[in-house]
Image (spheres, coloured by chain):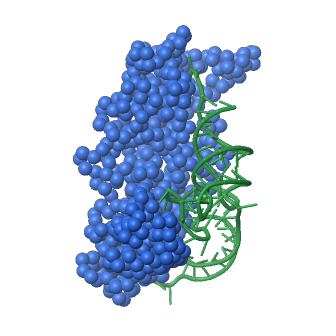
Amino acid sequence: MIMNIEERLREIVAMALQKLYGYKADEGIIQLQNTRKDFEGDITLVVFPFTRYSRKSPEITATEIGDFLKQEISGVEAYNVVKGFLNLVINTDYWISKLQDAWNDEFYGIVQAQDNAEIVMVEYSSPNTNKPLHLGHIRNNLLGYSISEILKANGFRVVKTNIVNDRGIHICKSMLAWQKWGNGQTPESTGIKGDHFVGELYVEFNNHYKKEITELMAKGLSEKDAEEQAPSILEARQLLLKWEAGDKEVVDLWQTMNNWVYKGFDATYKKMGVDFDSIYYESETYLVGKEEVLRGLREGIFQQKDDGSVWADLTEEGLDNKLLLRSDGTSVYITQDIGTAKMRFRDYDISKMIYVVGNEQNYHFQVLAALLDKLGYSWGRGLYHFSYGMVELPGGKMKSREGTVVDADDLMEEMVNVARKMAQELGKLDTLSNDEAEKIYEMIALGALKYFILKVDPKKNMLFNPEESIDFNGNTGPFIQYTHARIQSVLRKAAEKNLKIDTTTEHFPDLISYKEKDLLKRVAQFPDAVRESGASYSPAILANYCYELGKEYNQFYHDHPIMTETEKPIRNLRLLLSATVGKVLKTGMNLMGIDVPDRM
RNA sequence: GCCCCGAUAGCUCAGUUGGAUAGAGCAACUGCCUUCUAAGCAGUAGGUCAUGGGUUCGAGUCCCGUUCGGGGUACCA
């Protein structure tokens, strides 16, 4: 493993500045970047910032530094100067050795977690148990899973967790609907997936509820009063009270219906390829939160109003007053989060807690951090809200009330159907058995969906148009999968002809073409992409890296024969390069939770 | 009202701590399957980086104003 050329360059540039101009380099003043394609060179040093110390023109300064570098570093073969940019040409040996390292390193680009590595807990998914998962959850799940894998690849121990919102008025609504209009049916008896079954009951409740509101308003009640007095909602509230009191019949029904939903969720998670190491249930954490609030009240951290409601005054931290317990003593959303957080920090030695939750809750997490801080928990301020943007439809936000939600199961199924149809039209996979082909259709379909979502900057809102199905051509998951499949095909052909890749000897050409070098440089940057992706919590960085690499490989592959190349050193280099690109693409895609097939 | 976020090609999105002539894909148009997989490759066309100022050797990127859009804002989760 030879020293990274960038580190060496920084060191020697600093030395050059000292010797030539008597200037001790400040942090960050040495800017190295990849040389633009249209100029000769590999790495470029920006010399503009040095001119005030050299008191010479940018061109002269660059030339002086270039001479110094060429003399001091054997890897610097040549240089040229364009305005204030010093373009350095790094020799072939360096790049070849980078390629050998990449290929020989079993875990190239990945930092293995040590036993004593810091523990990062990542919460994602966080479903309510009254309806199935939709497109918004898909973005959440994919981001949560992917960022967990990326953090692992950066040497952290990661605990993936899920907080299931399994109690509350929303579940009671579905329960009531089942009692009144369910006719004793079950997911088993109807053949409907459990989460969808319960979701339909929830819709049924809302239909009745709406009708009652309309009727009451016709009798002259205001909308607000009608909403409060409709029989359905009163009955649902009764159920919630009974549940809190531990009424056996209600708790049993709650248990049963939640289990239906969990079974459905499990199937969805499995298909999506996400999983969890530890699951928390709100029904088990909300009382802990309530105790914490009451402790805060006793200790004078929080205040109680005349009606019995408990409040936190956060105006000093630039936030508002926040309700913590309702006047009837029941807990609200934030109360439960306090309890959940406390339990987690008790259960694990967490050094970083990451919440993958939509940006509509930015304020909520500011408040949560402030509250935990007030309650005396040193880790409160360290909570990190991984705030991602919403998925919008052409008509705006998804609204379950208007029936514009895109169901997760439906979408995944539809993607598989399209992938299958397309593959059959193209005559792909005809030689495979149905089972094998079906597996690959699924990989491609999910690859398309996952990549479509993950390639977008998580912070930004994104648009999904259900009318136009997700693409399989261009900057897509299948494009990268396709590149990988083709590489594997090349390697299979090589194996058939008994051509072994020779990495140990000097069986490489003395000169490599720009195309190959570009590709090789890209491969060398993979570890940076993984690190960058983890540091900025953005799978999109990795996604775009994989696309660039795949595209460059495809372009290269097109006019650089591999199997028919007669010169052995060149063929050897190209085979090694192909194999390494394949490995990197697979690793990168897997970090995003995307499988890559060996053929497609 | 107040707070937060966003605006880059017809559409969907990239654009590294401020660096060279603004980058892809889709859609449109033109070529390329007798060669290791055409889910591919090569090319044409498409831009006042919402807008007006400012900072400097240099601004899509940083600061201020304006417009438009999204989200939040004390008893939903």
The one nearer the camera, A76 or A442, is: A76
The one nearer the camera, A504 or A42, is: A42
Q: Is residue A93 left or right of residue A228?
A: left
Display colour for chain B: green
Display colour for chain A: blue
Q: Position of residue A231 (x, y in %)?
A: 61, 16
Task: Give the residue displayed 43% in from the left and 76% down from the top.
Answer: A64
The one nearer the camera, B71 or A25, is: A25
Whether residue A468 can be seen here: yes
Q: Which corner quadrant holds the C terminus of chain A?
A: bottom left
Q: Is residue A22 left or right of residue A179?
A: left
Task: Give the residue displayed 47% in from the left and 69% down from the top.
Answer: A54
Residue A117 against residue A431 in the figure, above or below: above
Residue A138 against residue A17 in the figure, above or below: above
The one nearer the camera, A599 or A352, is: A352
Residue at the far bottom: name it. Answer: A566
- Please identify the quarter of the rendering in which residue A519 is found: bottom left
Task: Give the residue displayed 37% in from the left and 50% down from the top.
Answer: A151
Q: Which corner quadrant holds the N terminus of chain A?
A: bottom left
- Please identify the quarter of the rendering in which residue A8 is found: bottom left
Task: Give the residue displayed 53% in from the left and 73% down from the top.
Answer: A57
Q: How many numbered discs?
A: 0
